[in-house]
Image (cartoon, rainbow, N blue to C red):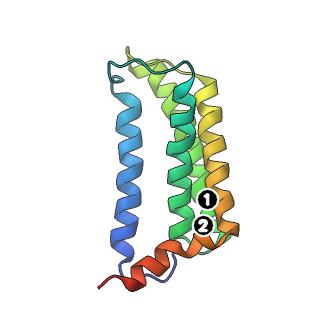
Amino acid sequence: MRDFRRPRLWLALWWLAIAAVIVLSLTPPPPMHVPRNFDKVEHLLSYGFLATGAVLLFARWRAQLCAATGLVAMGIALEFAQGMLTRTRMADPADAAANATGVLLGLLLAFTPVARWLQRLDARLP
């Protein structure tokens, strides 16, 4: 992990976000109209956010890559779970592809100054 004053807090928030994605993926969708294929944008943004969290938390490329691989595997597993365990969701390979694309985009932030944003924020908090 990066050098934080509050490493447990940041790690817990990341795990909470992962848990939220799991729960939201397996519960019935809200009864509202969304534009066609807009859910792909939601998948991309959600998994991009989770991968960005990994980049912000982990200093080493290997740890970031392991987290990214785990997120892609989670996205694929959740698609299978939606198809087999729920009646209100269906498995969609395009959703898994959007998840993986989001992870890749989030992982690319490792090569930008954004990668140290959480570390700087953590240092400024009282």
Residue toward you, 118 or 20: 118
Q: Which residue is at 48% across, 19% downward?
A: 83
Q: Do the residues labelled 2 and 1 touch (CB within 8 Å)?
A: yes
**Identity of the residue furthest to the left in this view:** 126
Which amino acid lies under the numbered mark 1 shown in the image of this protein? Cys
Label 2 and label 1: CA atoms lie apart by 5 Å
SS state under label 2:
helix
**Is 11 displayed left or right of 108 in the figure?**
left
* Place of residue 91 in the rendered image (x, y in percent of width and height, measured from the top left): 53, 21
- Residue 37 vertical position relative to residue 78 in the rendered view, above or below: above
- Type of residue at label 2? Ala
Q: What element carries label 1?
A: helix
Q: Quadrant of residue 14?
A: bottom left
Residue identifier under label 2: 63
Vertical comparison of 106 with 7: above or below? above
Q: Which residue is drawn at 59% across and 70% down?
A: 115
Sort mark 2 into few (<14), some (14-19) or many (20+) by Cα contacts within 10 Å.
some
Q: Is residue 6 above or below residue 44?
A: below
**Residue highlighted by disc 1:** 66
The spot of residue 23 in percent (x, y) is 35, 37
Give how far across and how far down residue 53 sits, in percent: 50, 60
Residue 106 versus residue 35: which sits nearer the camera? 35
